[in-house]
Amino acid sequence: MEKTSELIWQDTQHQTLFQLIEEIKTKHPTSDIFAKLFHYADSHFCLEEAYMKKLNYPHMAEHIKAHNKFREELGDMIKEQHGFDDNVRVSVSVFLREWLTRHVLGIDKDFEAFVLASDYK
């Protein structure tokens, strides 16, 4: 069996996260966009973390720490979102996109390689 270069569920969920982040910088984002992003990201992180535990991933603590930092920072943004003007929404969107890009291309790629080398692909 040939190994794929991407875990399909992970890639699909990452695309959805990027789409939700893009919605933040629109002229008239829905009022619940931050909550929707938080819940989707949390669900995605929980799935990854469950996979890590099942596989006994050796870098699990570091990865979960990064997830928790994102949860914390996004939670803080949710509390402050009512004062966001257009410029702040764009800045927040850029920050979140850059964080997620670094995460996906960094420690998520390491986790992906570990999964693909396992029997649980």
Image: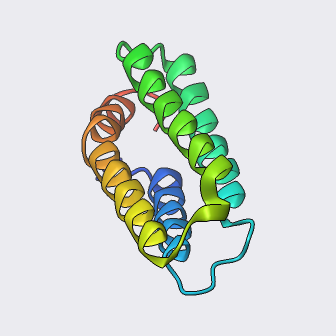
Left or right for 29, reference 94: right
Residue 83 lies, in percent from the top left, at 61, 63
Q: Is residue 115 visible?
A: yes
User: Could you say which is closer to the camera, residue 39 or residue 76?
Assistant: 76
Q: Residue at x 39, y 27 (%)?
A: 118
Instruction: Count how many numbered circles sit on residues in the image.
Output: 0
Residue 65 position, x and y percent, is 45, 22
Looking at the image, residue 117 lies above or below residue 74 = above
- Give the percent coordinates (x, y) of residue 70: 48, 38
Q: Nearer the viewer, residue 115 or 37?
A: 37
Nearer the observer, 28 or 8: 28
Query: What residue appears at the point 56 percent right and 68 percent down from the top-left corner?
Result: 20
Question: Which residue lies at the image location 67% right of the left edge and 66% below the top edge?
Answer: 33
Residue 55 versus residue 112 in the image, above or below: above
Residue found at the far right of this picture:
32
Residues 74 and 100: in front is: 74
- Could you say which quadrant of the image residue 51 lies in? top right
> What residue occupies the far front of the structure in this picture?
83
Q: Residue at x 52, y 60 (%)?
A: 17
Does residue 3 appear in the picture of this structure? no
Depicted 45 relative to depicted 79: above or below = above
Residue 76 placement: quadrant? top right
Residue 26 position in % (x across, y down): 52, 83
In this picture the colour scheme is rainbow
| Residue 81 located left or right of residue 9 | right
